[in-house]
Amino acid sequence: MHQLLRSYQPSVVKLFTSSIRTYASIGSRIPATKVFENSPGNDINLAEETSSGSSIIVGVPGAFSPGCSKSHIPGYINNLTSFKNKGIQQVFVIAVNDPFVTNAWREALLKSATGSEIIRFIADPTGAFTKDLDLLFDATKIFGNERSKRYALIVKDGKITQTFVEPDNTSVDVSDASKVLEQEFSSAEIEKAKRWLANFSPDKVPKHHFQISYSRSSGPGGQKVNKTSSKATVSLEPGKWLDSSVCYWIPAPIKAQLESKGIRRDENTFECFKRLVEEIKATVYFAEEPNEDAQAKWAKLEEEFKERKKFNKKKMSDKKRSRVNKFDL
């Protein structure tokens, strides 16, 4: 029967807060770290390959793994024409595997794919490129070493413009091809967004979606600072920021950047619960029933201990007896 050996009774409430760090930050350039395509003799530089035009770099934990082979990468392969129509010139799939593996994986996945000339499979055998992007994670329990987080990066003229990094490293969610495709925009859409940004003024914001309140200000600011309700607070119902039903007036390309640069509640919530579970696991321990080998080992040690104890007892007894005989007159 399992017994709870150690329990945890906190004296204060423990708060778990999180603000997700930004990996491969927007605006940063692609590393010039050497990677390989098809064979160890064919090294390429993704910084140069993505230096002009629009590209997507898709990182995966491992070639031939179920999530990568059945869902994640097939999603991109099936949408190559759509990506091409959006102006994407190349899609790079990169994994921390050797080039022979990634080449075999490419052949297995691209047997009858339309538009496959724009997708390339890249090997990062040492993980150096992925490390430079700060997108490695410890996958020792699954793959035996460090691997790439699952992610997608939109790169334009050598710079990262959007990031889609899975918060739990391996799920197929935020980096799914359909979601990345939704965030990729045509030149016409981007130009329209630029004009909106240049001409949009505060008086055009639909104020009826916001809660506006007034209160007295505190601190320096004039004679009437603490006498009149001059401080204005504009707020929005939780969860409504960038929601299409409320922020329909913001062009999609601008919303996409706000979402990618802003705080992602789902990621932060996941991280908080992750820390909670880690705290529980680090605090509580259950004794396990020993297996047969362990039982035999302990039985042998116990028998040896008894024999040693018996031997030492006899030795002490003989020693005492010899002392008595020595002084017996």
Image (cartoon, grey):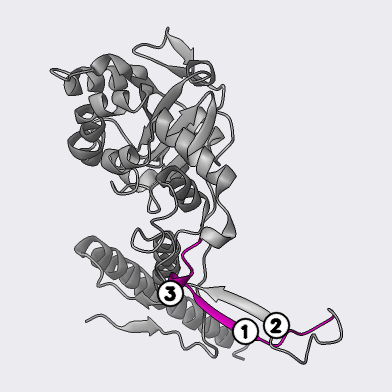
In this rendering, position of residue 326 left or right of residue 100: right
Along the polypeptide, which appears first: circle 3 or circle 1?
1
Using a 10 Å C-alpha cutoff, classify the residue at mark 3 as few (fewer than 14 neighbours), some (14 to 19) or many (20 or more): few
Along the polypeptide, which appears first: circle 1 or circle 2?
1
Residue 97, located in which quarter of the rendered image?
A: top left
Q: Which residue is mark 2?
A: 230
Position of residue 265 measured from the top left corner of the image (x, y, whole percent): 43, 63
Amino acid found under the numbered disc labelled 1: Tyr
| 15, above or below 96, in the image | below
Q: Is residue 327 magenta?
A: no
Using a 10 Å C-alpha cutoff, classify the residue at mark 1 as few (fewer than 14 neighbours), some (14 to 19) or many (20 or more): few
- Tag 2 near tag 3, CB within 8 Å: no
Q: Which residues are magenta?
A: 205-220
Q: Is residue 208 magenta?
A: yes
Q: CA distance from mark 2 to mark 3?
A: 22 Å
Instruction: Determine if residue 127 is in view.
Output: no
| 293, above or below 25, in the image | below
Q: Which mark is residue 237?
A: 3
Along the polypeptide, which appears first: circle 2 or circle 3?
2
Q: Which residue is mark 1?
A: 214
Using a 10 Å C-alpha cutoff, classify the residue at mark 2 as few (fewer than 14 neighbours), some (14 to 19) or many (20 or more): some
Position of residue 247 measured from the top left corner of the image (x, y, whole percent): 41, 59
Frontmost residue, 199 versus 225: 199
Position of residue 63 measured from the top left corner of the image (x, y, whole percent): 28, 30
